[in-house]
Amino acid sequence: MEREIDRFIRFLAVEKGLSENYQLSVRRGLEQFAGWVSATHEVGEVREVTLDHLTSYLAHRRLEDEVTAATLRVNLIAIKIFFRHLAAKGEIPADLAEKVDSPKLAKYLPDTLNEQTVAKLLESVDDSQLLGKRDRAILELLYASGLRVSELTGARLEAFYAEERAIRVTGKGNKTRLIPVGSAALKALESYLAIERPRLVRPHTGSEIFLSKWGKQLTTTRIWQIVKTRAKLAGIDKNVYPHLLRHSFATHLLGNGADLRVIQELLGHADIATTQIYTHVDQKHLRDVHRKFHPRG
């Protein structure tokens, strides 16, 4: 896919004569999509991309990356002109992106795991094995505190307050917030810090909490891989990724009676409208339960 993107950008530059800034904007949008579809679905070839991949990515950008409508339109335009070009050249059988209707994107609801599945995932990690304590702490913290992946990778030792059972992270817009750490996550994190992290430290190691086996800061891509691998080992037949735990965190809080404003603060949403998507998720769950169990549902 990277090769096709390079060819397309050269086409925009040489044959269309479009500006360098436009080329950079399109390249950035296409590379973001290529990186996402590779990490989440292991798709590396343009011909392997499906309509579901496209719509899921755009929903991911809107609901998980929390981009503005304007940014989402820019992303969609880049994808549309790319696939239209490939279809015209006969590189792909049909222009899938033509079927994507941007106004409908707002109707996509974030997927979640139920509480039993989350428990199955967390408890499946054997912390007596190599890197087990680290991976258990990562999963526990993602779910217990609803962190974004970038916030998790950037979390530092000096920002973890064990006595207060809280962690300070830096989110979007370089804004910091203090988030509670649940008892199970606290136990897992303290075990990792006391026993496993010291073994990972090297002369070049910084103060990041989570380290690779070479003593370096974990990348967001590596966190994705860890979560997906652990879910597979747990026998969970679903596409599990870090932000799914964040969605589950928010949905379970709401389902158990938490105030929407509190959830907004915990998630670090600048706008309450972004958080309100979880009220729709909860209503969907209620309708599903009603249909399943009510005699006339």
Image (cartoon, rainbow, N blue to C red):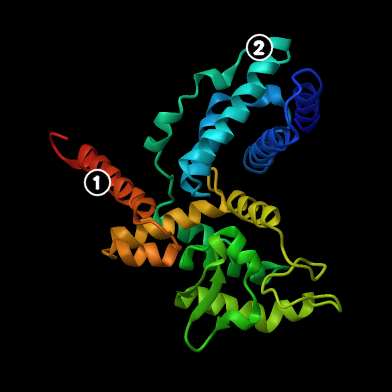
Give the structural element (helix, strand or loop) at label 1: helix
Query: Can residue 125 be seen by looking at this rendering?
Result: no
- Mark 1 is surrounded, within 10 Å at the Cα level, by few (under 14), some (14 to 19) or many (20 or more) other residues, namely few
Q: Position of residue 286 (x, y in %)?
A: 24, 46
Q: Position of residue 119 (x, y in %)?
A: 46, 61
**Residue 193 in the figure: left or right of residue 167:** right
Residue shown at the point (76%, 22%) measured from the top left:
17
**Residue 114 in the figure: left or right of residue 242:** left
Marks 2 and 1, Cα distance to the nearest angstrom? 41 Å
Earlier in the chain: of badge 2 and badge 1, it is 2
**Residue 80 in the figure: left or right of residue 207:** left
Can you say whether 207 is above or below 105 in the image? below
The label on residue 191 is: none
Which residue is most to the right?
203
Q: Amino acid at mark 2?
A: Pro
Name the quadrant containing residue 40: top right
Residue shown at the point (44%, 62%) measured from the top left:
267
Can you say whether 250 is above or below 161 in the image? above
Q: Which residue is mark 1?
A: 286
Which residue is most to the bottom?
163
Can you say whether 107 is above or below 12 in the image? below
Q: Amino acid at mark 1?
A: Leu
- Mark 2 is surrounded, within 10 Å at the Cα level, by few (under 14), some (14 to 19) or many (20 or more) other residues, namely few
Q: Position of residue 123 (x, y in %)?
A: 53, 64
Q: Are marks 2 and 1 in contact (CB under 8 Å)?
A: no
